[in-house]
Image (cartoon, grey):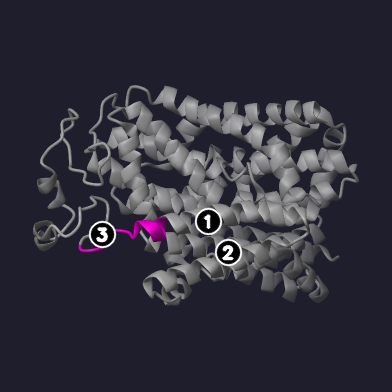
Amino acid sequence: MHEIQTYSAYAIFVATITLLIWRPKGMSEAYPAAGGALALLLIGIVKPQEIGEVFGIVSGAVVTILCTIVMSIVLDSIGFFRWSAYNVIRYARGSGIRLYWVIMALCFLMTLFFNNDGSILITTPIIIQVARLLRLKVHQQIPYLIGGAMVATAASAPIGVSNLANLIALRIVGLDLNTYALLMIPPSLAGIAVIALVLLLIHWRAIPKRIAVLPEGSRQAGGAHEDGNLIDPRAAAGRWLPESAIESGRTPFHPLRDAGGDLPDWRLFQTCIAFVVLIRASLFAGEAVGIPIEWIAVAGAASLIFIRWRWTGIGPADLIRKTPWHILLFAFGVYVVVTGMRNAGLTDWITAQAAPYIAAGGLMSIMWTGGLLTLMSNLINNLPSVMIGTMALTDMGLDGRTLQIAYLANIIGSDVGSLLTPLGTLAALVWMFILKQHGIRFGWGAWVRTALLVIPPGLFVSLAALHLWTQWIG
């Protein structure tokens, strides 16, 4: 390979990553990824025959993620997320500390059932709306917001279907979903718990100990004063519904629904939620008997669309409009770029530097892999990093067991360690953008100061727990 070709490949890689993170004028992330892939193809770093191989690796993962997004759009259209916001306040029962843990649980579950980026997009507006309904000051909102962002992002580690890069990398190292979950759930849960606990401790003084309460056992919910006393529900309704809806008395008002919107059909609501849980469980059951997870995801999304159509008469037009179809082009482009970096010698260099430590196995292998991916993720973002890291691991000639455990440490570094800076993950950048849209100031410096206290202990506990857990189960 000519030297000028290699340098050109690295320049294209840097330009692609810069545009992915910067996204000037709201540019879709698919454009720089596709542009970088095309440029590497044109200069000959990536061969035409490699394109088909890339598509075979990427397509199943992308289809699964797209189907997950479609299901989240269906749930949003029937009021699931407004219902979630209402119940966050209801289950807090007037305690700011309990509210914190309820929000952490919500963010964790949203990532578990959907994906990390979708969880950020869903839960951040919910948390902001909850905070405003409770009339929290900005400094009181921050613990809930940053805690939710970090937990939602780190929660993509426990199962393989909550993160696009995780799904793609699973195929490379030959891990199935069930083995992945068996090995990863305990160590990643330990790390997430540490992150949430440390965040709570460092923000203890900012979190209000008493907050407003909503009437128990009722869908009616008024606003509240900061001392926790309820005010007239009809007065609170005025902030959410037109006067005609309040006066009609046809249905009890829901304070977190859109003005003028209908209350959810609760039978449809419960049916759809149960169906989503069933689909998520079927991904694991299906793979155990050899059914590709993308087939199950497509069948599940199609069934959910059909249920909504039969129940409400609403067709799929909104889903076609709202689904981010460009994710297919984005994932394909990024993987082609990473393949180009492999061909240009980047993974060979990483392999030469890290192989002696990782091949040793045990705790050293886990710590080295997790640390390397943490560093790479915070320098060039975690999506290309996890792919580059996984490719490097497969080139080290490791035995199957060592390769799989090193890969899991790879995922912990890219999902948890990447949170040291907003640059590490697109989810953090999306979170900061949403806050800016809502007039909440929280800059990179504030993020890094918090993350330096929170992420290292969470990362260390996750990696150490991975070593102990894999040793224990053999």
Q: Which residue is drawn at 87% across and 31% down?
A: 360
Mark with earlier residue (3, 1)? 3
Q: How many marks?
A: 3
- Tags 3 and 2 in contact by the CB under 8 Å rule? no
Prevailing secondary structure class for the magenta stretch in the rendered image:
loop
Q: Give the range drawn in magenta.
A: 260-269
Q: Which residue is drawn at 64% across and 46% down?
A: 159
Quadrant of residue 414 in the image?
top right
Mark with earlier residue (3, 2)? 3
Distance, label 3 to label 2, CA atoms, is 28 Å
Q: Name the residue under label 1.
A: 276
Q: Is mark 1 on a helix, strand or loop?
A: helix
Q: What element carries label 2?
A: helix
Are there few (<14), some (14-19), or many (20+) residues within 10 Å of tag 1?
many
Q: In this view, does 219 lie above or below 315?
A: above
Q: Name the residue under label 3.
A: 258
Quarter of the image containing the C terminus? top right
Are there few (<14), some (14-19), or many (20+) residues within 10 Å of tag 2?
many
Q: What element carries label 3?
A: loop
Instruction: Measuring from the top left, give residue 365's x and y in whole percent.
Output: 80, 33
Q: Which amino acid does label 1 sit on?
A: Val
Q: Which amino acid does label 2 sit on?
A: Gly
The residue lying toward the viewer, choosing from 246 and 122, is: 246
Q: In this view, does 33 lie above or below 346?
A: below
The residue lying toward the viewer, choosing from 44 and 7, is: 44
Q: Name the residue under label 2.
A: 300
Are there few (<14), some (14-19), or many (20+) residues within 10 Å of tag 3?
few
